[in-house]
Each structure stands twice: as C-alpha cells, then as structure tokens.
Amino acid sequence: MKINYDLEIASFKEKLDQFWQLARDKVILLGNRYDPAKGSPVYTAEGKYTTRGWTEWTQGFQYGIPLLVYDASGDPDMLETGRESTFEKMAHHISHFGVHDHGFNNLSTYGNLLRLANLNRFEASREEKAFYELALKMSGAIQAKRWSAIKDGGFIYSFNGPHSLFIDTIRTCRILLVAHGLGHRGLDENDAAINLLERAIIHGLTTAKYAVFYGEGRDSYDVRGRVAHESIFNINDGQYRCPNSQQGYSGFTTWTRGLSWAMLGFSEFLEYLEEVMPEYPGLEDVQQSFRKAARATCDFYIENSALDGIPYWDTGAPDLHKLGKYKDSPANPDNDYEPVDSSAAAIGAQGLLRLGRLLRKSEPDAASMYFQAGLNILRTLLTEQYLSTDKNHQGILLHTVYHRPNGWDHIPRGSKVPHGESSMWGDYHMTELCLTAQKIIEGGYYTFYQSIP
C-alpha cells in the first residue's frame, strides 16, 4: 500500500459524523427487519442479513454496535437497544463451552456496558455493574478452561478440538485479561487455581511462536509476517505438527483476516501489559515476543495490500496473479478472479493505529508509518465504495468475505466473485475503528480494559 504521511486524523471529523448517522440507521433497519428466531445474523445476501450455522460468534457484534454508536454520538436509543438486547439475549453466550469466541461476544456487549458505566457515560447501579462483572468473570473462566497444554506452553483451543490453535483467539483471549482484572480466577479439579492472566499470556506466546512466521527458515514458505490461520499440535506428546487453514487458501498462504486478528490482538495485548500490568514478572520478554509479532504482521499487511490499503482475502489466493500488479493500484472488489476482504482492512487498520500510538515515544519513525497506514485505510473505508449507503441494505461495511473455500459468500448475478455484501464482524470492527479514531481526535482513547475499574 502507498502511505500518505500528510493525512491528519482531525480531518476525519466530518466523515465520522456522517458514519455515526449511517451506523445508527443500520442498527434500526436490522432490528426492524431481521427475525432473531432464525439465529444470529452472520452476513448479508442481496443486502439482507442471513444466518449460517457453524458457531454462535456474531450476536455480540450485533448488540455491541449500538453501544459503540452511543459512545460516539450520545444517542440514548442506541444505549437502550444494546443494553436491553444484552439483558434479553446474550446470557447463553456466557456459558457457551463449545467456542473460542467469548471475547468477541461478551466483551462487545457486557464489556462495553461495563466500560461505559465505569466512564460514567450512563447511570448504572452497583447491582447492574456487578451483573456485568459477573458475566465477564464467568466468560473468562469458561474460555480459559479450553486449554491444551503442550511441550513448551499451552493455548486456548478452537472449536476444532484440543489439537487446534486459531490465530483469531489472540483477540478473543482479552476476556481472560478483563476477568483477571476484575479479581477473578478459575478453579479446576480438586480446586486447582487457574491464573487467567498467566493463561492468556502463555496463549499469546504460543501464538506468536507458532502461528506467526518471521523469515527465519521454519519452512519453505517462511516469509516474515505471514500467519497460519490454524496451528496443529499432537495432543499426545504436545509437539507442534504443521500449519493449516480453515478459511484461508492453505496453511502455507496468509488468510488476511487472520493476519488482521494478529495485528490487532498483539497490539492490544501490548497496550494492556504496558498500562495495566507493568510489574508482571518477565514482562520485558513477553513484550519483546508480542512486539515482534505485531510489527512483523503489520509490515506484512502494508507490503501485501493494494495501493489504497485494502487486502484481497488471501495473499496466496490461486487466481490472484491474474489481476496483474494488484498492489500497484487500488483494490477492485468487482473483479473476475479473487474477492477483497474489507473486514480484514477494518480490523487491521485499528491494529496499525494502536501499534503506531504504542511506539510513538520509543520509535517515532516506525510509529508514524503504522499510524499513517491505519489512517490511509480508514480514509478508503469511509468512501461510498465501501460504506453501505443504500437505505435498504442492512449492512454497514461492504465487500467483506466470510468463507471463500466453502463458497458461503453471496456472488451477485453476473459476477464471478463475492462482493457488495456485509458481515457482523466487519460492521462491528468498522464501527470500533471509527470510535478509536474519534476518541483520539477528542483527546481520549478507547480500550477494552476500561471495563476494569
């Protein structure tokens, strides 16, 4: 991508104001037209949200979006929508033992509500705050129980089973950090205590070691900054076996949404450690590992995205070469060969902003590169090409991709690849990216650990 270093974040104010009105309208539209009896909305087909049974990982995004809109705009209807929906419909996600997605569902809802209450953005009784805290504590403990010990550490395993480490989980394990910060610990058999902070850090170290590549010769495709969606372990002896992919093209290519989860997940983890846990034993080594992973993945994203900062869905997609020098021109969602994934851009842009802010004192030149790259992506995503301005389209962010290998994404009539549709994670992370930018403009900042008093 080409980075414009002259962009100033304050110049986004008018576009952000327009975005909040659009996001509010979409929350209302989806609430009026979607039948929740069908299950959680996942992605749109012909502009209408539909579900896709795999795991229940998107409902928290649906109800988290109005809470973010409220935070930015102060619209009381948005607070009421997110608050009441969380009370009425999110309880089963707290005790969902079958997924690695607790940080997605429950931090987006209970976490945002507690954060807003702690910041005195709305009046919440002691009992209401205690309710949110209990939900987050239980969610963190249940997520931590999905634990596979390996020869040199351990990880929170995916819904595929104890052998499977997903790159996505580096962001969902934030729920363990919040639960720990709220004073909670897990209890296992014979009352064996589970330190939630330690488990989250070990998971992060395992992810950095095995899911991220550094150009150090691990295999024939070891390019610095690429990631594997899934890392496979032998659970009998704890040995690492191979990279794999569920939603990317292969274990030896880089699925760009997985890349973005790493960019954002490691950057947020670093912020948390610096601001909340500066006395953690061995902190310097942990930070070094996470910083190495964050910088490598962010560099890889910058090097492998289109000119305007939007990536295609996988950097090794089989027909990508047919697009020619695709990195030398803006991304083209309506092409005949491979889809772009704007949800990866929304997630990755936030990671770039956070890493840039984190490095601003120690490495100002690198900090400027990352921060300005994030702003360049935000500028692209705030254009009409990527925002769903059609009043009947239920999504917010256009041109997101869910599962290309399974063929789940809607392909418009007359087209050859998916485009023009939205997803709940794309909509949420676009909203979260805009909130992050607005808070910086206002002289503040947004973090998930503001849920901790």
Image (tube, rainbow, N blue to C red):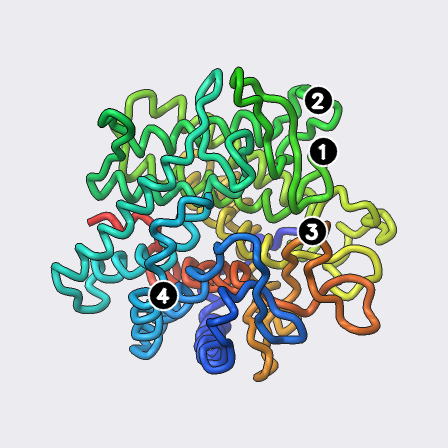
In this rendering, is residue 383 above or below 144?
A: below
Residue in the image at 52% along x and 32% along y: 293
Q: CA distance from mark 3 to mark 1?
A: 14 Å
In this rendering, is residue 209 above or below 185?
A: above
Label of residue 219 in the image? 2
User: Closer to the observer: label 4 or label 3?
Assistant: 4
Q: Amino acid at mark 1?
A: Phe
First-in-chain label (4 vs 3): 4
**Neighbourhood count class around disc 2 (C-alpha, 10 Å): few under 14, some 14–19, many 20 upward:** few
**Neighbourhood count class around disc 3 (C-alpha, 10 Å): few under 14, some 14–19, many 20 upward:** many
Determine contact: label 2, label 1, CB under 8 Å.
yes
Disc 3, SS: loop
Residue in the image at 61% along x and 81% along y: 390
Name the residue tied to disc 3.
313
Q: CA distance from mark 2 to mark 4?
A: 46 Å
First-in-chain label (2 vs 4): 4
Name the residue tied to disc 4.
89
State left or right for residue 386 relative to residue 78: right
Name the residue tied to disc 1.
252
State left or right for residue 259 relative to residue 118: right
Q: Amino acid at mark 3?
A: Trp
Disc 1, SS: loop
Q: CA distance from mark 3 to mark 2?
A: 23 Å
